[in-house]
Image: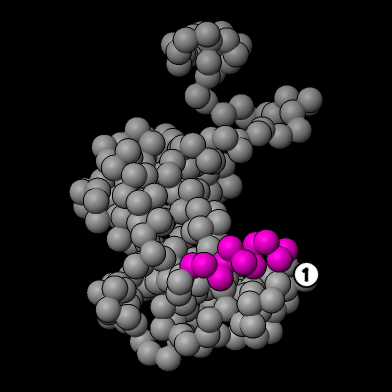
Amino acid sequence: LVGDQHAVPCQRCNLPRGSCLGPPHIAPPNLRGVMVGRLARDRPADLADVDRYFYGEATNPCINRRVLMERYISFLERVYPRRCCDDDERVTLDLVRDVTLSILPKQQCCSVCEEFRGLRNNGEITTQQEDVDGGIAPKDDSMKVVQPAVASSTGKPNQTRQSGKRSRRHSKYNGVKIVTRIIDRAIQPTWGILAGEKGKIVFCRVSHELSRDRCCRNCGPGYILWKAMESVPDEIWDKPFELSDG
């Protein structure tokens, strides 16, 4: 194919090394898939138009970075709920879906996350779901509330989840109930959301600093990300995602 048609190498797109931006009408017979793992990690915004462009959906799930972050924060509130308002001394260690024990908060919020919980209750954070026991109620049975795994309140190690050495280390947290590993696992997937945009370095730095702040760690990774978003101008979060054919 030559001239005004897309091909590889492509003269129409006029890109380095003959790259082509036009998707092929017929996939090559040897094509089995495309690995996009690092792209999803480093530049997730580049995949914002996949649902519409490749799968023919009428719209994409998120129109900008703010909507994406709000949905992710709602997810974190279900999976890693806050521990700032309960009197249970056990430590959130990991995500275990078969744990039946529920740790319920004694009050709506603490003095640290009061503003965040207030916004959520006013509907400014979650627009499609409702608060239930400090988490988010799923819209259907496919997204059920997940309970956190916890260490033994006696200080003895949970033989199925942690060693004695790890249990002793957790006992020195002085009231911090969510381990660093949980916070890091939750916030690191967001560090590429601002790739190529102003404020990426500041957002990563602030979110990391907050994750190490013992005063707010019990409020959960959802609060930490919400607070870190304040370090980036609103116009960056509200900027619409670019469409593939635009």
Q: Is residue 167 left or right of residue 88?
A: right
Q: How is the image coloured?
A: one colour
Q: Nearer the viewer, residue 33 or 211?
A: 211
Visible residue check, residue 75: no
Q: Residue at x 24, y 51 (%)?
A: 231
Q: Residue at x 26, y 37 (%)?
A: 198
Up-down: is 107 above or below 80? below
Up-down: is 111 above or below 69? below
Please tell me in which quadrant of the rendered image residue 125 appears: bottom left
Magenta-highlighted residues: 162-173
Quadrant placement of the C terminus: top left
According to the image, label 1 marks what residue? 160
Find residue 238 and report its horizontal and vertical position in percent: 27, 52
Q: Is residue 80 left or right of residue 150?
A: left
Quadrant placement of the N terminus: top right
Visible residue check, residue 106: yes
Q: Nearer the viewer, residue 14 or 93?
A: 93
Please tell me in which quadrant of the rendered image residue 193 appears: top left
